Every structure is written in C-alpha cells, then in structure tokens.
Amino acid sequence: MDALKKLAPHAHWLLRIGLASVFLYHGSGKFSNLSGMAEGMGLPVFIFALVAIGEVGGGLLILLGGVSKEWMTQLAGLAFAVIMIGAIFRVHLEHGWNSIGNLGMEFQFTLLMTSLYFLLVGNGNTSGT
C-alpha cells in the first residue's frame, strides 16, 4: 500500500482526464451544427455557442491547470458547474435520477459534483502553484 500512497499526489489526473474527455468530446461535437442543436434544445445560438466554448475551453483549462495555475482549474470547475446546472434544470431533472435513453440526471450530477470539487479545491497541493 505504500506504493499507492506515493502515487496519491498524482491521482487528481484521473479526475482531470475523465472530466476533460467528457467536456472536450461533447463541446467539440456542438460546433458542427450550432444552429440546429441550439434550436433542438430551445436555446439561442449565442448561448449554445457559449456552452460549446465553455465545454472545450474548460476541458483545456482543467488539463492545463494541473501543470500551471490554480485559477485555470477553478475557472474550468466554475464553467462546468454552470453548464451542468443548466443541463440538469433544462433537460434532465424532469426525467429523474436515472431513466431509459440516458435522459436522467445521474451522469450530469456526477459531472457537477466533480466540477464543484475542482472549483473549491483548485489544485490543492498537486502542482505546486
């Protein structure tokens, strides 16, 4: 178990990479059809574009924050939290916790909690900045 304790200071990368991969994937996919997807969700294109930028930008910031400045980590956490709160209340809440077709909010809630962790904790003592 001592070997695992030596790896503990680097464990934040597991959460960072997981969170970044989800938001980079979903955010980059939005750019191919901003107006159509915005219309389908009942959002103005400008707002939907901000969501896509927040997802991609936050994905990059959460990764860069791990080797650079704490504000990058915290800004990504804030952006993701705002996006997930919007997603939960606009789409997923009415479908409950878990539902057929992935419309429930189980996954979005997990992303929200992970985002809030990075917003509140920042880099902790993981990167020395």
Image (cartoon, rainbow, N blue to C red):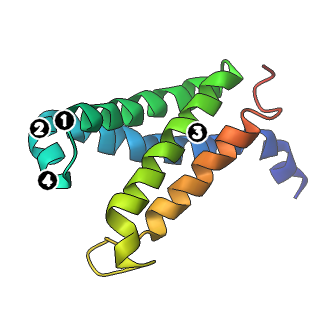
The residue under label 1 is which amino acid type? Val
Left or right placement of residue 68 versus residue 93 in this view: right
Q: Give the residue at x 81% y 22%.
A: 128
Q: Position of residue 28 (x, y in %)?
A: 27, 35
Q: Quadrant of residue 95?
A: bottom left
Disc 3 vs disc 4: which is toward the camera?
4
Disc 3 vs disc 2: which is toward the camera?
2
- Circles 3 and 1: CB atoms closer than 8 Å: no
Residue 123's place in the image compared with 97, above or below, is above
Going from the N terminus, do you reach mark 4 or mark 2 first?
2
Q: Quadrant of the N terminus?
A: bottom right
Q: Which residue is mark 1?
A: 45
Going from the N terminus, do you reach mark 3 or mark 4 first?
4
- Secondary structure found at label 4: helix
Dot 4, crowdedness within 10 Å: few (<14), some or many (≥20)? few
- Circles 1 and 2: CB atoms closer than 8 Å: yes
Dot 3, crowdedness within 10 Å: few (<14), some or many (≥20)? many
Q: CA distance from mark 3 to mark 2?
A: 26 Å
Q: Which residue is mark 3?
A: 77
78 or 100: nearer the viewer: 78
The residue under label 3 is which amino acid type? Gly
Dot 2, crowdedness within 10 Å: few (<14), some or many (≥20)? some
Q: Position of residue 61 (x, y in %)?
A: 52, 26
Q: Quadrant of residue 68?
A: top right
Disc 3 vs disc 1: which is toward the camera?
1
Residue 74's place in the image compared with 88, above or below, is above
Q: Which residue is mark 4?
A: 40
The residue under label 2 is which amino acid type? Ser
- Secondary structure found at label 1: helix
Q: Which residue is mark 2?
A: 35
Count of picture labels:
4
Left or right placement of residue 54 versus residue 9 in this view: left
